[in-house]
Image: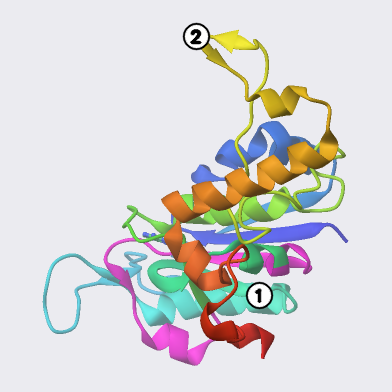
């Protein structure tokens, strides 16, 4: 069974969007994954088909109603009982390559896209939903975040990336950013490609790439070093890292 994605949204026209092109689009055309959408508004019960209401306690904007969202969610959970259900929200757990890997290894995912100020919190208490954020900034809705999650999953599906990239050396797979890349021309605007990359010495090249990956990570993403531990430096006083214990 190919990886099946279902997106619950007020804007189904936003899908597949960019996922209909290039790598993901080709994989979809080849039947390696599928995407369908569910219009949340179809689950509104009143004659105005309203999906939102003003926030309890006052304040700006509107909040998506728990009853309408639950009806849409129940429909999807019934149809795809094996697939995890994510909700895109800046209040969610941060999306990581590890989470993506886990999702891509499963049968598929369902993704609920929030709009307005947010979703009634009781929904998350009453249904098995994993709130996920793609970063510490606020988008105008969860749809673009859902596209990000799906893009990251689809490229990991069997046969999608091909032999060119197994993905194993990429940023975050090793705990570090990936090493920098270069290609012809050898001289561009007075800048050359690092000599070691032209040496043909594969061991030396691998060592250089590892060192650059670690240096760049330390410089740009010290948070990653802290999270994974510093592989190049022994821990102070010979103490073991927590995850080695
Ligand atoms: N919706 C709005 N902002 C978001 C974010 N950063 N991540 C996921 N969903 C969102």
- 37 part of magenta stretch: no
Q: Residues within 10 Å of mark 1 (few under 14, many from 20)?
A: some
Quarter of the C terminus within the rendering: bottom right
Residue located farthest toward the front when viewing the structure as drawn: 237
Image quadrant of ligand 1 equals bottom left
Between 61 and 147, the residue placed more toward the observer is 147
Whether disc 2's CB lies below 8 Å from ligand 1 is answered: no
What are the residue bounds of the magenta stretch? 102-129
- Residue under numbered circle 1: 84
Q: CA distance from mark 1 to mark 2?
A: 52 Å
Say whether residue 61 is left or right of residue 73: left
- Residue under numbered circle 2: 190
Quarter of the N terminus within the rendering: bottom right
> Residue 32: image x %, image y %?
83, 49
- Mark 1 vs mark 2: which is more N-terminal? 1
Between 4 and 184, the residue placed more toward the observer is 184
Can you tell which mark lies on residue 179? none
- Residue drawn at x 35%, y 61% is 136
* Secondary-structure class at tag 1: loop
- Residue drawn at x 35%, y 68% is 51
* Secondary-structure class at tag 2: loop
- Residue drawn at x 72%, y 48% is 155
Q: Nearer the viewer, mark 1 or mark 2?
A: 2
- 112 part of magenta stretch: yes
Marks 1,2: beta carbons within 8 A: no
């Amino acid at each position: 069974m190919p990886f099946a994605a279902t997106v619950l949204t007020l804007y189904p026209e936003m899908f597949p969007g960019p996922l209909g092109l290039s790598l993901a689009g080709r994989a979809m055309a080849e039947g390696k994954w599928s995407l369908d959408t569910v219009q949340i508004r179809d689950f509104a019960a009143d004659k105005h088909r309203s999906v939102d209401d003003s926030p309890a306690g006052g304040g700006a904007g509107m909040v998506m109603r728990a009853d309408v969202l639950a009806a849409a969610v129940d429909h999807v959970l019934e149809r795809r009982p094996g697939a995890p259900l994510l909700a895109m929200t800046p209040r969610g757990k941060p999306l990581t390559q590890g989470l993506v890997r886990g999702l891509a290894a499963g049968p598929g995912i369902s993704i609920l896209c929030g709009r307005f100020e947010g979703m009634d919190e009781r929904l998350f208490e009453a249904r098995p939903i994993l709130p996920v954020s793609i970063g510490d900034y606020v988008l105008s809705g969860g749809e673009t975040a859902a596209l990000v999650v799906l893009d990251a999953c689809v490229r990991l599906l069997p046969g999608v990336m091909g032999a060119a990239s197994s993905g194993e050396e990429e940023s975050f797979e090793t705990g570090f950013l990936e090493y920098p890349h270069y290609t012809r021309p050898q001289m561009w605007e007075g800048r050359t490609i690092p000599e070691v990359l032209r040496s043909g010495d594969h061991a030396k090249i691998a060592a250089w790439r590892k060192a650059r990956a670690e240096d760049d990570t330390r410089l740009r993403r010290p948070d990653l070093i802290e999270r994974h531990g510093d592989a190049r430096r022994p821990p102070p006083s010979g103490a073991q890292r927590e995850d080695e214990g």
